[in-house]
Amino acid sequence: MSRLDAILAHKRVELVERMAAVPLRQVRGAAENGPAPLDFCAALRRPPEASPRLIAEVKCASPSRGVLVEDFDPLGLAEVYRANGAAAVSVLTDEHFFRGSLEYLREIAALEPRLPVLRKDFILEEYQLYEARAAGASAVLLIVAALKSDRLRALHALCGELGLAALVEVHAFVEVEAALAAGARLVGINNRDLSTFNVSLETTLRLRSAIPEGVVVVAESGIHRRADVDYLAEAGVDAILVGEALVTAADVAAKVQELSGRGGYES
């Protein structure tokens, strides 16, 4: 069993428990009364000659590296991200493998002035989309490798109905085809293979050419320094999603400025 398979198996059990504890009708009602989502795609579109927009991730732990931050302060991180050039914030909400929380997202999404917030989790059910909408998310992650084509299309369509952007994540050409067939207008290229957890920025270079103009492209994983951002900018990405390099930095504000293009690196 791959790491992804193990995570998905646990997520299915977790979802059964959550859906039994809080019925769908209750979560759907909360979603209908939640704050209007911000325009996630608009925040990520990169003007000509500008640096790729930064989605800065609030991340405590990962399955591959364990705990990344001992004194974890999700709200404090989000404040630093916003003040130093992040275009959007990604919040891990998986509790078991990433030590995340939907409550972190709820609190961060309520910060003023608001930034678009991505719910990063292993989304398998419509229930999770309503949860995200109720918590104040502007976008959710849909992982092609975790979803059959009919599930992907159904979840993507519901995102549209709820006003949520769907960041559809791919790692191979066949997954790009599935994402585009589902109607994706926002595609994340994950440089980490979710089966092996190996990372290579070359994945973005290989797959970018298969994504048509007009689709917002986000490079994910393996981004640590300004040279990585410049390398991906040459490939034509609109945005980058960075977690570990930020939360483990000695000076988080300076690292956000570096990767976002502030602080004398690029305007």
Image (cartoon, rainbow, N blue to C red):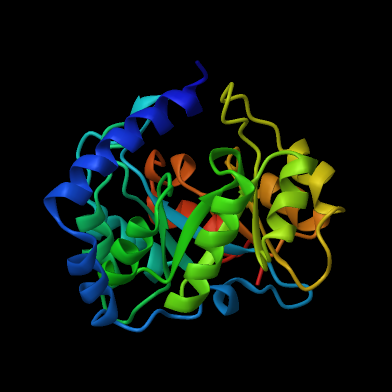
Against 73, residue 3 (above or below) is above
**Which quarter of the image is occupied by the C terminus?**
bottom right
- Please tell me how many numbered marks the rendered image carries: 0
Horizontal side of residue 142 vs 265, given as left or right: left
Percent position of residue 106, x then y:
24, 65
Q: Is residue 209 left or right of residue 100?
A: right
Image coords of residue 59 (percent x, y)? 35, 44
Camera-side residue of 82 and 111: 111
Q: Up-down: is 5 above or below 158?
A: above
Q: Can residue 68 be seen in the rendering of this structure?
A: no
Q: Residue furthest right?
A: 209
Q: Up-down: is 60 above or below 159?
A: above
Residue 213 visible in the picture: yes
Quick check: 113 left or right of 226?
A: left
Task: Name the image quarter holding residue 260.
Answer: bottom right
Give 10 or 196, whichever is nearer the viewer: 10
